[in-house]
Amino acid sequence: MTRSKNDAERGSVAAELALALPAVAITLLLGAGALGAAAQQVSLQDAAADAARLLGRGESEATAHATVAAAVDGARSSSASRGDLVCVSARIDAQIGRLISIPLSASSCALSGGL
């Protein structure tokens, strides 16, 4: 029995798909991880701004740091006064998969004594 040309082409298409599929899957997973890191960056920036406003209104540092930790799991924060401003910096290491770690940071300042 002889094989037709179509049978041989079908086999090569299956082999090409088998080679390309893992690359496509890895690309999709990395893209989803990057979107997740971007979402964490936005949350971190919002949390730093909220904490700075809390400190500006006279709340305790513990309350401000707890606000950052509650908004973004694993986030660390620090605060400092700069003249009439109180500033909060927040940091986290975003994980993409198990192998890639991206450090993210955000900072925000608010007028001290503001209501």
Image (cartoon, rainbow, N blue to C red):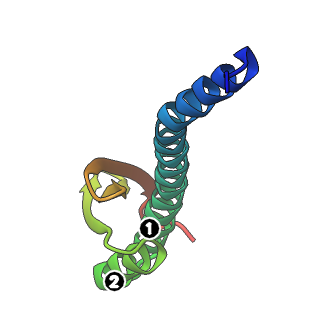
Is 84 displayed left or right of 22 in the figure?
left
Q: Position of residue 74 (x, y in %)?
A: 31, 73
Find numbered disc 2 in the image and state the secondary structure of the residue it sits on. Answer: loop
- At a point 47% along the width and 41% down the height, the residue shown is 22
Residue on which the image places disc 2: 60
Query: Which amino acid does the dot numbered 1 rest on?
Result: Gly
Give the tally of numbered discs. 2
Q: Quadrant of the N terminus?
A: top right
Query: Which amino acid does the dot numbered 2 rest on?
Result: Ser
Do the CB atoms of the residues marked 2 and 1 lie less than 8 Å apart?
Answer: no
User: Up-down: is 16 above or below 112?
Assistant: above
Q: Position of residue 78 (x, y in %)?
A: 24, 64
86 or 7: which is nearer to us?
Answer: 7
Q: Give the number of the disc on residue 2.
A: none
- At a point 49% along the width and 66% down the height, the residue shown is 53
State whether residue 93 appears in this view: yes
User: Up-down: is 15 above or below 68?
Assistant: above
User: Up-down: is 77 above or below 63?
Assistant: above
Q: Position of residue 82 (x, y in %)?
A: 28, 50
Q: Quadrant of the C terminus?
A: bottom right
Is 113 displayed left or right of 2 in the figure?
left
Q: Residues within 10 Å of mark 2 (few under 14, many from 20)?
A: few
Q: Give the number of the disc on residue 56.
A: 1
- At a point 33% along the width and 76% down the height, the residue shown is 65
Distance from Cα at disc 2 to Cα at disc 1:
10 Å
